[in-house]
Image (spheres, rainbow, N blue to C red):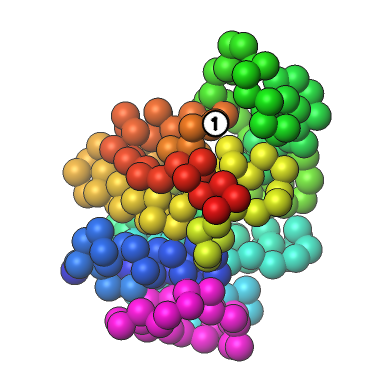
Amino acid sequence: MIDTLLIGGKGNIGSGLRKYLPQLDSDYRITSIDLSGASDRVGTPQPNDKFIELDVSADDAALRKALEGRDLVVYLARKDPLTDMNAMTDRVFKAFMDVCPTAMMVGSSSVHATGGAYFPFTKEPYSIIAERRFDEVKPWPEPLSARIDPCPTGDYGLEKAYVEAWCQRLGAVGMKAVAARWGGINADNVMTDEVAYFTVWCHQEDSARFVDACFKASRSGTLRSGAHYYVISDNTHNIFDIETPRKEIGYQPQHDAEDFYRS
C-alpha cells in the first residue's frame, strides 16, 4: 500500500491525482485534505475517496496527525496573500520533516516559477509561438532547461519559488522531495483561451504519471532529491524541457495538446 496524502486534493491537480494514480497503481490509498465547503473538481466521485476537512494554515496539531504514517505527500494547497501562503508552506514542510521524515514530498511549483524566462510571450521567438505562426520559428528554440533557477515575475511565481527552496532544503538534509513545475492543468482536460496554453498544457493523467514516477524513483533510490521538473504533456509545440524528467525519473507523458486544441 502507498499511503498518500494530498494537501489540497479537490482542486484541478488534486482531482486528477485522485482519479489517475490508482489507475496507474492499485496500491495507492489516497486521503485528501481540503477546506470545509471546498468545491470538488473531480466530477464523478472516486470509489475510495477519503477526505479530511482542515485548514492546514491554522491547525498545526490536526495537520501533524494527518501526516502520520504517510508514504507520499503532495502539497497542492494555496492561499493569498503571499505572506500567508509562505507561512502555510513553512508550517506544512516543518510538520512533514517532524512527522514523516522517510516519506516522499512532491511540492507544488509551477511554470510561473520561471516566468521571467518566457512570459508573457512578448519577445521572439515566444511571441511568434504564442500566435501559432510555427513555420516562422526557425530554428525552434531549445527547451527551457528543467535545471533553470527560479525567475518569477509576480507573487504567484514567488510563492512557487519558495516551495522549490523548501524542496531543496529537504534534499540537502537527506529527505526525499521534488518540486513539480506544473503546466496548465484543468479538470476538463481541455484547451483554454490563455495565451500559448497549447505549449504549457498538461493532461491530468500526465500529472499523475509524473507523481508516480517520482515516487517509484524515490523507492528505488534513484531520485535526485531537491530537484525541480516541468510537468508538461508531450506537446508538439512544447518549449519546456521534459527530457530531463524522462531520463532521471522515467516520466512518460501520454498526451499532446494539439489533439485537444479547439476540440
**Left-right relation of 69 to 53:** left
Amino acid type indicated by mark 1: His
Residue at disc 1, secondary structure: loop
Q: Quadrant of residue 34?
A: bottom right
Q: Is residue 174 above or below residue 239?
A: below
**Is the residue marked by circle 1 packed among few (<14), some (14-19), or many (20+) residues within 10 Å?**
some
Q: Is residue 127 magenta?
A: no
**Left-right relation of 122 to 166:** right
Which of 154 and 183 lies nearest the eye of the viewer? Answer: 183
- Quadrant including the N terminus: bottom left
Please give the range of residues in magenta.
Answer: 31-55
Q: Which residue is mark 1?
A: 237
Q: Quadrant of residue 204?
A: bottom left
Query: Residue 99: x, y in percent?
Result: 38, 68
Tell me the residue at 77%/36% (across/down): 120
**Left-right relation of 35 to 99:** right
Q: Main secondary structure of the magenta part?
A: loop
Q: Is residue 119 visible?
A: yes
Tell me the residue at 29%/38% (across/down): 250
Which of 176 and 263 lies nearest the eye of the viewer? Answer: 263
**Left-right relation of 234 to 122:** left
Q: Quadrant of residue 138?
A: top right
